[in-house]
Amino acid sequence: MLLIFGLGLIAWMAGRGRARTLALAASVRPHSLPTQHGWYVALWTIAPALLFLAVWSQVSNGLIDASVMADPAAQSLSTDLMNRDSILGEARSLADGSLEAAFNPAAEALVKPYATAIRFYGSIGAVAAMLLAFAGAAYSWTRIRPKFRARTRVERVVMGALLGASMIAILTTFGIVASLLYESGRFFSMISPGEFLFGLKWSPQAELVAGQENGFGAIPLFWGTIFIGAIIAMIVAIPLGLMSAIYLTQYAAATTRKWMKPTLEMLAGVPTVVYGYFAALTVAPMVRDFAVILGMENPSSESALAAGLVMGIMIIPFVSSMADDSIAAVPQAMRDGSLAMGATKSETIRRVLIPAALPGIVGGVLLAVSRAIGETMIVVMAAGLAANMTANPFASVTTVTTQIVQLLTGDQEFDSAKTLAAFALGLVLFIVTLLLNIVALRVVKKYREAYE
Amino acid sequence: MNSELAARAPTNWVSTEMTSRIAKRYAAERRFRLIGLFAVSLSAAFLAFLLYSMLAKGFAGLSLSFLTNSDATEASEVGIWGAFKGSLLTMIVTLGLAFPIGVLSAVYLEEYAPRNRWTDMIEVSINNLAAVPSIIFGLLGLAVFLNFMNLPRSAPLVGGMTLALMTMPVIVISGRNAIKSVPPSIRDAALGVGASRVQVVFHHVLPLALPGILTGTIIGMARALGETAPLLMIGMRAFIATPPTGITAPSSVLPVQIFLWSDEVDRAFIEKTSAAIIVLLVFLLAMNGLAIYLRNRFEQHW
């Protein structure tokens, strides 16, 4: 591959040089610059060869396997497909050096045929790619003339690349929706959507028993998610975020603002795993001690309050910057009017600015909620695994994201209902966050338009 | 009307009733101001407390051997070099994929895209991707890269690809803003002397927009560096005692290493976890500092 890029570089220089000499010899003004001719030749050299290599790497895998299977050493392999594939895979990684010792004696015998096959097909691929590169270079080389419109051709390729890059975003969205829908579809063929969405008991079992509840009722998870992300975290984040925004934009001196704003934004930059560790190690014991003071017996060390509190801290800068934006969007005339009537600054803020900015603030809070319910590490580390339906903030509750991590990091095979349930939870999470975002953005947009 | 107004006695500002009302309102004003100050200081105090508790617990764990060793079963022998190298490889893959794709999409959307339904779809999906919870990207990586494409588990390659999908929308959005802020007169001038539309963008607009794009890229990369959940999904949680040798070798990354150590029952791991957090925070702080520096140094007002 490096070789091909090397060739491409040579082709670029050669094409440029030839275009220059031809232009000088013919003493006409060429249509395109020499560099563009160079790019044209280089593209013709690199692109077909790379394309061929990409296809070849797929095709040759099958060819290599086929040739190894024809080898006498492979004839003795068991006909069990799973077993055979694992031995073949091991022999293969031994042959290309990514594995150092064999676990399976049967694999050892296959290393040699594998190595020869890989070398054989590898060299065929390399030679063919080189030939293609030379052919492309030769073809494009002969087309260089002063009148040749190399620029137009090269730019067409560039536009194609730009369009291709933007398609990645659509592909990703499509990939998310497709993979979530497909795996959830498989899950719902085992568990009915009704039981999943409205069931009250969450204790997933790997073995399914037909005709009875299997512990896939997700209501306790939804409650835990809302309790931590939308209630406790918001009780912390909304007052602190809103008041910080008001103080920093309306009262603070310019230097205070210059220093405090980035400081508060640092709260959003701290990785969530650090918050999770902080919640589990420092905040959770404090919450437990507090529960003991309140007279509770045996409070759990993992509590909704600890996770929600820390999550609220994390969300503060988010709420604060949204509130900041919407207060700044309130027309100056409304402010001046209120102040001219003799209202004090705080009266203006409370009676005029906040009511006027309310739709924007609500939109920001919705965005913050969608952030909070998708948050994973804090709740994984601090909220616990017990699926309780409780409004007691000192009890342990669990959330959708916690359970996704829990279900997928075990050792089960991939097709069990337990692992597939994670995708169904992911689908619910995806839909809910998407809806929250759409609604929030629409609210904010409407509000902006009202003042323009 | 006029006579009524004239008949009203002028407000007596010095009567006791009036002065006490004014005093009350000023007291409310001061209270409100204090509440605001309290909110700001409380938020800052949380940050200070977090940093202090990490420093207090982890400072003793920082040593040369901690920086050069890899994961081990014994708390006294663990180090972060393996996880650090894994993070580095993952970030290289992420940057290598997300930066070109992100910048090219931003250029396309801002400079060339015709106003039609395709363009709208691209824009909507980019804005939505920026708001999708990170764990969903982990599910995507698990379903597509591991189960469908059969790439190696817990390798920096897969981790980097997953994080690249997550970082790309951030780069596209900041890139578009940077490109948008380049004034149209630059484009008109270049077009006027005969440059093609591709030459206009690649010779003139992109170099001018580069500082803004880089700032956004660094912020996106800092987020990717601290990300844990999607990497747990694609299996990057194994015990790996040697630094990874390449982008397809199994490896760990810094945040996941922190998560794994935080689960250890051995009390000695608390010190090591906090020390690893200090290292991670130093890197994030440096990256964010660089982004702010770039923004202040190269920001142009047209």
Image (cartoon, helix red, strand yellow):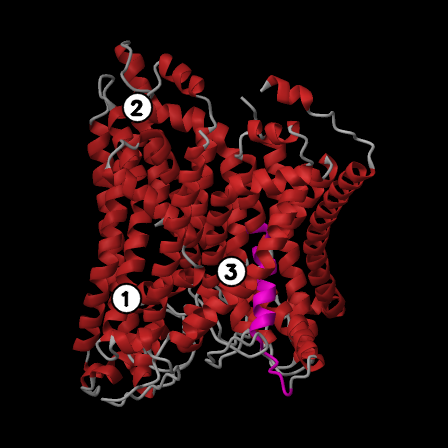
- Residue positioned 68% across, 71% down in the render: A282
Q: Which mark is residue B227?
A: 3
Query: Nearest the camera: A100 or B68?
Result: B68
The one of B246 and A152 positioned closer to us in this rendering: A152
**Tag 1: amino acid:** Phe
Report the amino acid beneath label 3: Glu
Disc 1 is placed on an element classified as helix
Alpha-carbon span between mark 2 and mark 3:
51 Å
Tags 2 and 1 in contact by the CB under 8 Å rule?
no
Q: Position of residue A325 (x, y in %)?
A: 54, 39
Quickly name the residue at label 1: B148
Residue A347's tag is none
Name the residue at 46% across, 78% down.
A389
Of badges 3 and 1, nearer the viewer stands: 3
Element on which disc 2 rests = helix
Picture coordinates of residue B148 (x, y %)? 28, 66
Q: Residue at x 25, y 63 (%)?
A: A120
Whether the magenta-drawn stretch holds residue B209 is answered as no
Magenta range: A297-318
Query: Which label is found at residue A18?
Result: 2
Query: Which of the 4 quarters of the picture holds residue A337?
Result: top right
